[in-house]
Amino acid sequence: MDKYIKYIWLFFLFGLLVIVRAFENELFYDPYLKFFQNDYLYIDSPRREVLKLALSTTLRFLINTVLSLAILYVFFKDLSVVKFSVVIYSISYTILLMLFLYFVYNPKQEDYFVFFNIRRFLIQPLILLLLLPAFYYQRKSI
């Protein structure tokens, strides 16, 4: 693939990640968006529909995952990187969603900070920010 086309694809895919973030209020049900923007350490957990919240969070995670996997493929041109990343994303989703649901069902003010960070890994493409430099470093060290 031509270098310029690669950069155009990367710019487009990162742009889609930005669009998902920019329109998160319109696209996804998440009462915690406003909750964590406020002084959440001193207020009670918001009312929520747990099934709707779990499905919306899952949808957002899947959208971010698909875009992240596409970015990894365009960047490295290696299906083994994508396959390994699918395993990492699958394991991460399973563990993070279980923890997320635990904190949704058992909201305690002293756990809000941990809950905030677990939720952040589910709704934002932070795993991509970990995998890109890891694979890049692995490629450079070979």
Image: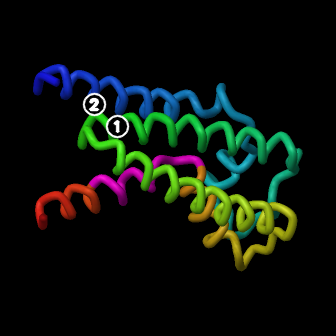
The residue positioned farthest toward the front in the image shown = 80
Classed neighbour count for the residue bearing mark 2: other residues with Cα under 10 Å, few (<14), some (14–19), many (≥20): some
Kind of residue sitting beneath label 1: Ile
Reply yes or no: does residue 107 show up in magenta: no
Residue drawn where x is 72% and y is 69% of the image: 42
Residue 101 % position (x, y): 79, 61
Residue 33 % position (x, y): 65, 46
**Residue 71, numbered circle:** 1
Reply yes or no: does residue 125 show up in magenta: yes
SS of the residue under disc 1 = helix
**Main SS type for the magenta part?**
helix
Real-space CA distance between mark 1 and mark 2, rounded to the nearest whole angstrom: 6 Å
Q: Splitting the image into 4 quarters, where does residue 9 fall? A: top left
Q: Is residue 10 above or below residue 108?
A: above
**Viewer-proximal residue, 65 or 42?**
65
SS of the residue under disc 2 = helix
Residues drawn in magenta:
123-132
Q: Is residue 108 above or below residue 98?
A: below
Q: In the displayed structure, does residue 25 sit left or right of residue 5?
A: right
Quadrant in the picture for the C terminus: bottom left
Of pointers 1 and 2, the one earlier in the residue sequence? 2
Residue drawn where x is 72% and y is 42% of the image: 30
The residue indicated by pointer 2 is 10
Kind of residue sitting beneath label 2: Leu
Q: Splitting the image into 4 quarters, where does residue 98 fall? A: bottom right
**Residue 19, numbered circle:** none
Residue drawn where x is 60% and y is 39% of the image: 62
Residue drawn where x is 62% and y is 56% of the image: 93
Residue 11 % position (x, y): 27, 27
